[in-house]
Structure formats: C-alpha cells, structure tokens
Amino acid sequence: MVRWRSGTVTAIRARWAGAVQLDVAVGADTVRALAYPALVGEPEPGDRVLLNVGAQVMGLGTGGYALVVALPDRLPADPPDAGDTRDHGHMVKARYTPLQAIVLGVDEEASPHRAVLASATSLDGMPVVTADLHSALPAVVAGVHADRPAARVAYVMTDGGALPAWFSRTLDGLAPVLAGTVTVGQAFGGDLEASTVHTALLAARHVLRADVAVVAQGPGNLGTGTAWGFTGVAAGEAVNAAAVLGGRPVGSLRLSGADARDRHRGVSHHSLTAYGRVALAAADLPVPAGLDPALAEALRPLAERHRIVAVDTAGLDAALRASPVRLSTMGRGLDADHLYFLAAAAAGRHAAALLTVS
C-alpha cells in the first residue's frame, strides 16, 4: 500500500503557497519530491526525509511526486497551545491517517465566524457553479470576470482529488483574484475549513462575502472508467446542496472535442451521470452558443430536468488567454481542447449574468 523510501534533500527546487518542491537523493537516483511544511516542517538541503513514492512509481500525471512524510532527525515544534482545543481548532482532516491535520472549522465554537454561520440559513440566490474537475476552476473564474471583473468568486474545494489545497499551483496563481478558498470534508489548507459542502457554501457567502461560488474537487481525481466510479460525480450532489440552501445551481458541463477516450468525447459520460442521475434539483447548464447539432442532441436527456442555456462566447477566448494561470486538463492546453475550457468559461459568464438579474 505504501512504498517507503529514505533519502537526503539535495536542493530546493520551487516554492508556492503551502508547498516546497525538492530534489532528494535516494541511493544513486534523484527523485522529485513535495513537502507541506505545515505538516512536516521546513526541509533543508542535507535533511534526511522519509518518502512515500507510490504515486511516482505508478507514473501518475497529477500526483507524480514523492511525498515527504517526515523529517525524522529534525521534527518541527508543536504548534502553540497544541494541547488546548478550547480556543483552537479540533476539526480533524485526513482523519486517522498518519498525517491527520487538526484545523479550526469555520463554524466551530472557537471560530470568530461561529455566530454568523450558526444563524445563516440561505445563500440568498448566490450562483453556485459546479464542475467535476479542478482544471475547470480558472476557466470558470475567467468567464465570471469577463463580464463582472469586480465580482467576488470563492472556491469550495471538495475532497475527491488532492486533500491539501497546497498541492494546487492553480490556486496559488488564482489567489489574487479569488475571494478565498474553503476546503471541505477531508480536504484541508484553505482559507477556511468546513466539514460539509453546505457549511462551505454558507461560509463562502456570509464570511468571504462571495457573489459566486465554484465547487469542484482538488487536483487529480479517482476514476475507474465506469459510470459511477469517479469522484467528480459529486458535482451532482453540489447542485443539490446549492438548491437546498437557496442558491442558483449552474452546472459546468465537461465537453471535449479532443479527448482520446470515447466516453469523454463530446459530452463526457461523467456530466451525464452527475447532472442526469445524481442531481435531483434543477440547474442551469450553460453551453457555448452555436453548439454542434450532434453535441446538442447528446444533451437532450439532461433537458428533462435542467435548463440548457446557450451562452454567447464573444470575448471568452480572450478572457481565457488572459488567465493568470496556465490552463490544462488531462495534459491538454487551451488550444488542444478549446471546447472544454470554453464550456467552463460559458458557465462562469452565465453565473455573472445571474448577478445582473438578481
């Protein structure tokens, strides 16, 4: 289950919010490794590190790092008042794993936001854009800001992919244009921590003062190639949560003209499952105007429950190209899979239009 290695840090390669990329000598080899200083401390050249190399050995595209589990010869100090949870967090994430993290939940008694969330019952019509892949996030944000550049967009990161928000270089690059990130369930490392999507959405609205929320899993995902065996199916549950709380669900459809897999070309079967089977509440499902007739026909089953909305895409290509972060999905950039990113940006533009009419 775990492929362990012991090595020595030889170089610090890069840093971004919450993460450090390292070169580690393991025997005669040098491996690329990632450390989260908030969990294991600050690694330095010469430190001995214990590594989990499973994802790297498997050749996973998103998670192909060796992960630092510990600096065994130089353990970090305990956090201040670590033994007293009365004034600090006692919400446990990545529960009962060796690196479980104890954080302050946004609605815990010790939280300064406790009173606000204890009384919050509604999203007040806030548009909530749901997506099944983390790579949709910057495109959705680009679509919102194309028409409403001052709109406050919050990201609700679910735990179907990476658990530490720090893993995402996309989030690091988007930080200046986001109102904040709320990490949900077993995910952690956001600006706010929540136990459920419902609490996270309320926090996005009433604590981060978001105009629009985007709900999607962190980088990476778990999928088996079957209709139900994909963590992004939870996008349908996010539609339900948004509707229950009085939000305006907007489903970002996963469309592609470039995916080599038949099940993802055109309309991904995951979108058909998440919105056609899992989402019980009605949502707006934006599509780029002028969609290919065959693609429009494939969306027909979703129109029985949801509203298919054609969105003018003028200016969205420019907005996508101006994104502060590199756009990439399954290794394909904007030009390689233009339809995928355009559909996500159309969802963002539609969410912005709902702000105009609300």
Image: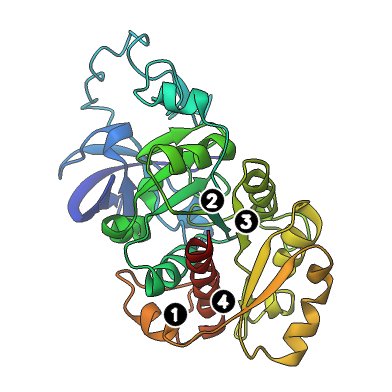
Q: Name the side, left or right, on which 68 lies relative to 265.
A: left
Q: Position of residue 341 (x, y in %)?
A: 50, 76
Q: Secondary structure at mark 4?
A: helix
| Residue linked to disc 1 | 333
| Residue linked to disc 3 | 249
Given the image, on which type of amino acid does mark 3 rest? Pro
- The answer to whether marks 3 and 4 mark residues whose Cβ atoms lie closer than 8 Å is no
Q: Earlier in the sequence, mark 1 or mark 2?
A: 2
Q: Earlier in the sequence, mark 4 or mark 2?
A: 2
Where is the N terminus found, in terms of image quarters? top right
Q: Quadrant of residue 174?
A: bottom left
Q: Earlier in the sequence, mark 3 or mark 1?
A: 3
Q: Earlier in the sequence, mark 3 or mark 4?
A: 3
Residue 161 got which mark? 2
In the image shown, does 25 or 131 lie closer to the viewer? 131
Residue 31 visible (yes or no): no
Binning the other alpha carbons within 10 Å of mark 2 as few (below 14), some (14 to 19) or many (20 upward) gives: many
Q: Secondary structure at mark 1?
A: loop
Measured in 3D between alpha carbons, the distance from the residue under mark 3 to the one under mark 1, in whole angstroms, is: 27 Å
Measured in 3D between alpha carbons, the distance from the residue under mark 3 to the one under mark 4, in whole angstroms, is: 16 Å
Q: Quadrant of residue 39?
A: top left
| Residue linked to disc 4 | 343
* Residue pictured at 46% horizontal, 88% vertical: 314
128 to 183, vertically: above or below? below
Q: Secondary structure at mark 2?
A: loop
Q: Name the side, left or right, on which 10 lies relative to 247.
A: left
Q: Position of residue 349 (x, y in %)?
A: 49, 72
